[in-house]
Image (spheres, grey):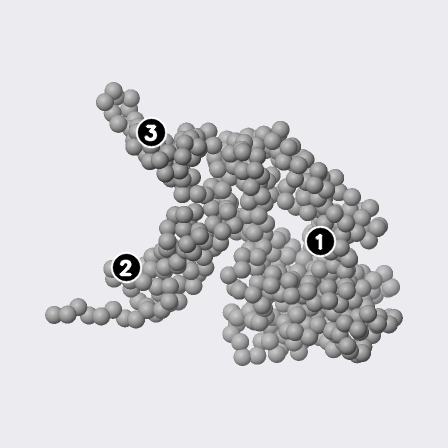
Amino acid sequence: MASKAKPRIGSHLEWHGNKLRVVVMVPPSLQERVGSTKLREALGTGDPKVAEALKHGVIQRLKDRIQAAHRGTLPSPITKQAMQWREAIALNPGTGEPQEVTALDVLIEDVLPGIIAKHGEDQAEHMLAIVEGRLTPLSLYVDEMAATRKYPARTEAKLRHAMKLLTEWCEQKGLAAAVETFDRKTTYAYFQEVFVQAGKNPETANDQLKWYGRFWKWMVEAGHLAEGAANPWQGRRMKSDRKKREAQGQAKRPFTDDEVFILLRDIKDQPIPDFARVAALSGMRPTEIASLTVADSKGGMFTVRDGKTVSAIRRVPIHPAIATIVKERMAGAGDDEPLFRDLPGKASDTRGPYAALSQRFTRRRRELKIGETITNSKQETVDFYSFRRWFMKKAGDVLAQGGAGFTPWTIAEVVGHSKESGELPLGLTMGRYPGPASDAAKMACIEAVMLPTKLSKPRPEAEAVTGETPSPVQG
């Protein structure tokens, strides 16, 4: 009797006995680093409908592994093999009997000769150093740290980029890309060469340097380094000249009213116009806006469910001037669907759903000649966050001019800043004891900010770019 044919299955699925599993092809250029031509993960079900519902998260996880290999943050096959032997030897050190064959004996007599023949003596020595605990590869624990800390995609990308740069520097210097390589002397050499002598912008440099300190601290917390082990990156920071650069117009700044008017008038391709209006009239971070779902936008409030700090988790009133935008974007969509379903780029982009929109906005902004380049930096004085800065400035201006209904602490709460950070007076008194601001106070703060409706002065060069005459910005 012929066996019953199995049901048809969707893409990225394959049968393994009577169960289904996800399969993702590895590009030929990355197969050696990944250690396989395909990545597979069992789903634990033989029902094609259930597998179809479960597969998407697994596909993304496997693709993230491939992307990590592309970025150079995955350990090489030799490194992974060395750690397996290291664990095996630790679990079975042997009894010391004369005729006993231990795992270490097998490694030295059978495995290492094959490594030498295929990869050379240097790689064999590298493998032995890992097995014996003399080296702990930097790349080995990046994935574990990222998974443990549960960083947002853009934050995780910063960690991986920093560790990749450190690994590449080691390779250039002929040093092992390992934790043990870095003592105070080595971190000082890296700090001087990569940041000080290269004239890097202090804020950019310090943002990268902090990841090395965090990595070493996490290694101790996770038990991969001894309790109390010294952190060789402690105190490695460039002296910031931020105040001086701010005085010289060389720091990040809010948009001016005229710039906001021009950007909202002249950039036509969605979703930038809608996204920018939400940013300007809510003070929310772009990544927070990109993460909003339909359910997060109901009841006249935006609900931010995740963020870089506890203060970032909050409810933000929806400004009347963008209520129509929100209503139109919610129409016909399910609660779990993104409010901005038309963001450019791919959902798998590890930089986050906002990254491609940011790049497109930057091109349009430069076409309109808005923003200046900061000296000794690739950065410019304005970016999409300048809408957020503009919101805070306008709300503060209203208070300075006698506005009522909200306080400086309300502004901090609306934008997701800590009220106890020390940047505001009476941080403990006003930040903790009164509790959160009322919805009425937050709405007063939101409604205090209004979009500009005209230019304060003519700007012929901007009109020449667009070929349009000024018109009021529609909310």
Spatial distance from mark 2 to mark 3, Cα to Cα?
36 Å
Circle 1: element type? loop
Q: Quick check: can you spot residue 180?
A: yes
Q: Is residue 119 left or right of residue 72?
A: left
Question: Helix or strand or loop: what does disc 2 sit on?
Answer: strand
* Dot 2 crowding, Cα within 10 Å, few <14, some 14–19, many 20+: few
Closer mark to the observer between disc 1 and disc 2: 1
Residue 180 x, y percent position in the rendering:
52, 31
Q: CA distance from mark 3 to mark 1?
A: 52 Å
Q: In this figure, which residue is indicated by the disc labeled 2?
A: 16
Q: Rate crowding at label 1 as few (under 14), some (14 to 19) or many (20 or more) other CA atoms within 10 Å.
A: some
How many labels sit on residues?
Answer: 3
- Residue that carries the numbered disc 1 in the rendered image: 379
Q: Which quadrant: the N terminus?
A: bottom left
Give above or below for 101 relative to 236: above
| Amino acid type for the residue under numbered disc 1 | Gln
- Note whether residue 221 is visible: no
The residue indicated by pointer 3 is: 108
